[in-house]
């Protein structure tokens, strides 16, 4: 079971956002781990992160990513862009929450601290 001190797992392809997320987590005192490949994601999920922060615009094999997160029962906070919202729509139902990159930027410190669970 995850705890408030459990890491957040970030599956993010955009290097700009990787840097921003890393710095925001550091300032917020939130443990953070990054993964990009299915084996890295699976290994990180075994550590029971509080949630997965998933970039829906990075071109990952989302079917595989969601199969892994669902098997691990870890909630997913995904982000997309306004321009790609329709294209990423098929994945939204498999996420706890989906936000735009703009919203993510504004709410990131709070989301990292509080998570996505209701």
Image (cartoon, rainbow, N blue to C red):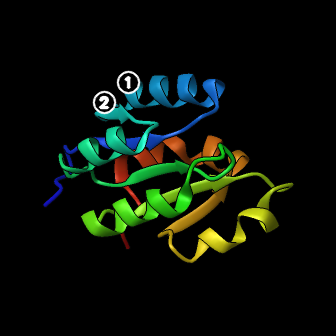
User: Pointers 2 and 1 in contact (CB under 8 A)?
Assistant: yes
Left or right: 7 as drawn, with respect to 59 = left
x, y (%) of residue 90? 67, 73
User: Is residue 2 shown left or right of residue 111?
Assistant: left
Q: Quadrant of residue 68?
A: bottom left
Residue at the disc numbered 2: 29
Residue drawn 62% across the image and 24% down it: 15
Under circle 1, the secondary element is: helix
Q: Position of residue 106 (x, y in %)?
A: 63, 44
Badge 1: residue crowd in 10 Å (few <14, some 14–19, many ≥20): few
Q: Nearer the viewer, residue 23 or 82?
A: 82
As drawn, the label of residue 65 is none
Question: For the C terminus, which image quadrant?
Answer: bottom left
Q: Quadrant of the N terminus?
A: bottom left
Q: Quote the CA–CA distance across marks 2 and 1.
A: 5 Å
Up/down of 42 relative to 68, above or below: above
Q: Secondary structure at mark 2?
A: loop
Count the labels in the image.
Answer: 2
Residue that appears at 80% across and 56% down: 84
| Residue 43 x, y percent position in the rendering | 24, 42
Q: Residue furthest bottom?
A: 93
**Which mark identifies residue 26?**
1
């Amino acid at each position: 079971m995850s705890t408030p001190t459990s890491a957040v797992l970030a599956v993010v392809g955009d290097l700009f956002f990787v840097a921003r997320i890393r710095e925001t987590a550091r300032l917020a005192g939130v443990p953070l781990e990054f993964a990009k490949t299915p084996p890295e994601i699976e290994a990180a999920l075994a550590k029971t992160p509080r949630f997965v922060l998933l970039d829906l615009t990075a071109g990952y094999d989302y079917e595989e990513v969601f199969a892994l997160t669902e098997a691990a029962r870890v909630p997913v906070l995904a982000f997309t862009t306004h321009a790609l919202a329709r294209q990423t729509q098929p994945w939204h139902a498999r996420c706890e929450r989906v936000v735009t990159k703009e919203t993510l930027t504004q709410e990131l410190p709070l989301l990292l601290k509080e998570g996505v669970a209701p």
